[in-house]
Image (cartoon, rainbow, N blue to C red):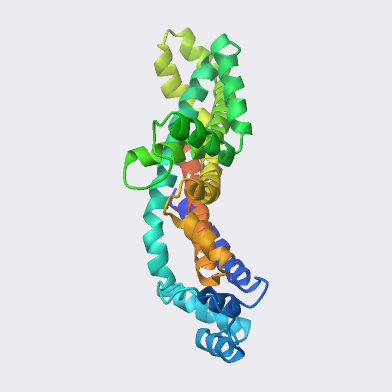
C-alpha cells in the first residue's frame, strides 16, 4: 500500500507543475493592456507615462520566461503578487474570501454525498417499485435543471414570495440553506443515479445472494457486502462532483451575494485583475488535483486489486 500511495502522489507532481504553467499563460492571454484597465478604475483615461510607470513597477515589460520564474518563486513563498486594482496583496484578498467559499463548498459537498448515496441505496434496493420510479423522475428533473435557474426559483418562491429565508447575506445558517440547495441538488441527483445502478448490479451478485440465503439480515448484507463493493464508481463521481461544486459556486455566490472567492473572481474578471484571476484558477486547480489524488488513493483502500501496481494485490475481495 505504501508503494501505491507514493506512486500516485508522485504522478500528481507533473500535473501540478503543468497547472502552474497554464495558469500563468492564462494571466498573460487577456485582451487589452492590463495596465490601462487597472488605471482606468480611477475613472480617468491614463496617460502614456502612467501606463509605462505601472508596467515597469509590476514587471509587465519583462520576457514571459522571466515573469514565469518570478511568479513561481513568489508562489513558493506563498506570494501570489499584488492586485492591479488595489494596493493589497492577492493573498490578503483571497484570505478574506476563502473561508466563506470553503464553508459553502463543504456544506454542499456533504449534502450531495449524504443525499445522493442514501437515496441511491434506497432506490437500488427496491428497483422499479413506485418509490423508485417517482424518485427517478424527480432526480432526473433535478439533474437537468441548471443550478443558476434553480437558485433563481428558490429566491423567487422561498425568499421573495414565501419570505421564509433571506435572499442574500452571510453570517448564519439561514443564509446558507438556499445556496447549498442550489449547489447540491444537481450533483446529488447524478450521484443518486450512479449509486442506484451500482447497488442493483452488486445486489445481483452470487456472494450477495449467498449471504441472503444464509439468513443474514438485510441491513448487514447491505452494509457488509453491498456498499463496499458498490463504492468504486460512487467515489469516482464524488471526486468529479467536488470540482463541479467549485465551478458552480462562482455563479451561485453572485446570485446570493455570498462574499466568497467566486464574487472576488467576477470582480477581478470585470477589471482584468490578472493576479487575482490567476490565483483563483490555481487554487481551484490544485484543489481539484488533490481531491482526485485522494480519490485515487481511496481506490486502494476500497479494492485491493487496484494496488496490484504497488505489488500488494491479493486478487480482489
Q: Nearer the viewer, residue 156 or 127?
A: 156
Vertically, is 125 above or below 179? above
Specify the farthest residue to the right.
Answer: 31
Q: Nearer the viewer, residue 25 or 45?
A: 45
Vertically, is 104 above or below 164? below
- Total labels: the figure holds 0
Vertically, is 74 above or below 116? below
Residue at the image position 56 percent from the left and 39 percent from the top: 147
Specify the farthest residue to the left.
Answer: 172
Q: Image quarter for residue 217?
A: top left
Residue 148 placement (x, y as % from top left):
57, 41
Residue 177 placement (x, y as % from top left):
40, 36
Vertically, is 289 above or below 217? below
Residue at the image position 49 percent from the left and 19 percent from the top: 122
Residue 10 visible in the snapshot: no
Residue 67 visible in the snapshot: yes
Residue at the image position 41 percent from the left and 31 percent from the top: 163
Residue 295 placement (x, y as % from top left):
50, 45
Q: Nearer the viewer, residue 262 or 128?
A: 262
Amino acid at each position: 500500500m505504501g508503494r501505491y500511495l507514493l506512486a500516485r502522489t508522485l504522478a500528481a507532481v507533473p500535473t501540478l507543475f503543468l497547472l502552474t504553467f497554464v495558469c500563468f499563460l492564462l494571466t498573460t492571454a487577456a485582451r487589452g493592456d492590463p495596465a490601462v484597465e487597472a488605471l482606468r478604475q480611477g475613472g480617468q483615461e491614463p496617460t502614456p507615462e502612467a501606463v509605462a510607470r505601472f508596467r515597469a513597477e509590476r514587471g509587465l515589460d519583462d520576457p514571459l520566461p522571466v515573469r514565469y520564474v518570478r511568479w513561481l518563486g513568489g508562489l513558493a513563498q506563498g506570494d501570489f503578487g499584488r492586485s492591479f486594482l488595489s494596493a493589497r496583496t492577492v493573498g490578503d484578498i483571497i484570505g478574506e474570501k476563502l473561508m466563506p467559499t470553503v464553508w459553502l463548498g463543504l456544506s454542499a459537498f456533504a449534502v450531495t454525498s449524504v443525499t445522493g448515496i442514501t437515496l441511491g441505496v434506497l432506490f437500488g434496493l427496491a428497483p422499479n417499485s413506485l418509490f423508485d420510479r417517482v424518485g427517478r423522475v424527480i432526480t432526473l428533473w433535478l439533474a437537468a435543471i441548471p443550478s443558476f435557474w434553480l437558485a433563481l426559483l428558490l429566491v423567487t418562491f422561498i425568499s421573495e414570495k414565501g419570505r421564509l429565508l433571506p435572499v442574500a447575506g452571510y453570517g448564519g445558517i439561514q443564509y446558507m440553506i438556499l445556496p447549498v440547495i442550489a449547489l447540491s441538488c444537481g450533483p446529488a441527483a447524478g450521484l443518486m443515479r450512479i449509486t442506484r445502478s451500482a447497488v442493483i448490479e452488486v445486489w445481483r451478485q452470487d456472494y450477495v445472494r449467498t449471504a441472503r440465503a444464509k439468513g443474514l439480515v438485510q441491513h448487514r448484507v447491505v452494509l457488509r457486502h453491498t456498499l463496499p463493493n458498490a463504492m468504486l464508481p460512487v467515489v469516482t463521481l464524488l471526486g468529479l462532483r467536488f470540482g463541479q461544486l467549485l465551478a458552480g459556486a462562482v455563479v451561485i455566490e453572485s446570485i446570493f451575494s455570498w462574499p466568497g472567492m467566486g464574487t472576488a473572481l467576477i470582480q477581478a474578471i470585470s477589471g482584468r485583475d490578472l493576479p487575482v484571476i490567476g490565483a483563483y484558477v490555481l487554487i481551484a486547480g490544485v484543489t481539484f488535483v488533490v481531491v482526485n489524488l485522494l480519490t485515487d488513493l481511496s481506490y486502494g483502500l476500497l479494492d485491493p486489486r487496484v494496488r496490484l501496481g504497488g505489488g500488494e494485490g491479493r486478487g480482489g475481495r
